[in-house]
Image (cartoon, helix red, strand yellow):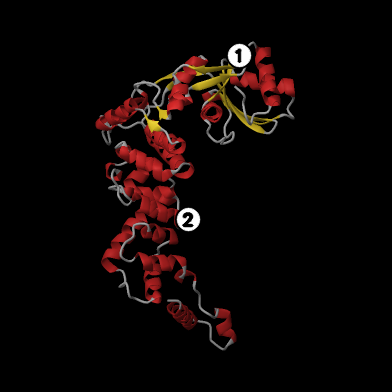
Amino acid sequence: MDLRGVPSSVLEALQGAARTLGISRLALVGGVVRDQLLHQRCGRAWSGVHDLDWVVEGDAAAFVSELIRQVGPERITDVQEHGAFGTVAFQLDGIPLDLATARQEHYPAFAVNPVVQAGTLQADLARRDFTVNAMALDLLGNELIDLHHGQEDLAAGQLRFLHAGSVQDDPTRVIRAARYAARLGFQLAMESRAQISSTIQMWPWNWRQGDPAMAAPPALATRLRMELERLLEREPWPQALDLLDQWQAMPLLDPQLQNDSRRTQRLRWSRRLGLPLMPALLLGAADPVAVAQRLQIPGKQQQWLQQCVTFCDWLVDASPPLEAPPSMWSSALEHQGCSPEVVALAVTLRPPQWKCLLRWWGRWRRIQAQQTARDLIAAGWQPGPAIGVELRRQRSEAQDRSR
């Protein structure tokens, strides 16, 4: 199997270090192997090399040290060792590589972080998410290793979890499944859909709020957020979210997000207004602020959601009438202390006042008085509050003329 996009000089350098150390397995793993096969055997357009992940049966740090000794520090740059995970990130001839010690793992309980220790390449492949991502190309033996029938699933355009406990071990794999299925145009295997259904039926298992002995694993929320961010930022998110909806998987985040008929509209408006998509998605939850806090989304976005909830209550109870002039709307919105992001987030909900909010966000708030305080003083005005009153009057007139 040829490695398109990987220079032979890089492969030769890796082979040389491995042979010197007597390493038996050095393999390219993950998405790049899948995408090479999709291109070469299934006729998919080549998407380029995005990540080069390597697994070595041996000490990754020792391997990189030997590589530096053989080829010199000029060719090896930006070395970052992550000892706790047995990985080293570096660049060889300017090409980013990630090298990991082969690992094996087990999950002591549902959804907790796994216990990881050094292992074989075979064990490392067994800890992956889908059969199509559990293939490896052994650089030393020039052998394609496919222990889980990944090639068959690639040819069938199918995603299949690697084993029967995949989703229970790590429910974030459901979101990952939606990401890959949307990107690759694959279907989820029936037994994999059954895994999702059984997990959702038990969700949230026997966790109890406020009971440390029975609380949800804290790292699970972080992993869910990270997968969701990747889905929203990197993938065809309308299709991916629709798949989560079809699989009845939204309760992993919040039950009310399931069958959220206005989801796509909110997110499209959010994209149009230059907002991150996560807050707009969570606006469909029963308690958007609580879900945002649980997922630990950025603090600024949590503030937007909290303020948006209060702002929407104000729209219902005390906002100006729809026919009010721009100056009245501007005065009312600015008196609320609303940031443009909060108003834009409210627009995604399409309340009755959404056109007024959108006009303030896009135009009215940027209109200024024709004169400045310096202009007025030069014209004979005395410094004092009257200048501020005049500038506000001029701005209001200019806003109303823009209608």
What quarter of the picture does the N terminus occupy?
top right
Question: Is disc 1 placed on a helix, strand or loop?
Answer: loop
In this picture, residue 240 sits left or right of residue 41? left
Image height check: is 391 above or below 75?
Answer: below
Q: Taking 27 as reference, is 281 left or right?
A: left
User: Residue 259: x, y in percent?
Assistant: 28, 45
In the displayed structure, 170 sits above or below 285; it is: above
The answer to whether residue 395 is seen in the rendering is yes
| Amino acid type, residue under disc 1 in the picture | Gly
The outermost residue toward the bottom is 380
Mark 2 residue element: loop
**Residue 106: image x %, image y %?**
40, 19
Q: Residue, x 28% and y 36% (percent of image)?
A: 210
Q: Nearer the viewer, mark 1 or mark 2?
A: 1
> Residue tagged by mark 1?
141
Residue at 44%, 78% (x, y): give it.
Answer: 396
Which sits earlier in the primary sequence, circle 1 or circle 2?
Answer: 1
Do callouts 1 and 2 mark residues in contact (Cβ within 8 Å)? Answer: no
Find disc 2 in the rendering and name its residue.
274
**Marker disc for residue 168:** none
Amino acid carrying mark 2 in the image: Gly
Quadrant in the picture for residue 205? top left
- Residue 6 in picture, x, y percent from top left: 64, 29
Q: Residue at x 48, y 20 (%)?
A: 125
Around disc 2, counting alpha carbons within 10 Å, would you say few (fewer than 14), some (14 to 19), or many (20 or more)? few
Q: Nearer the viewer, residue 237 or 113?
A: 237
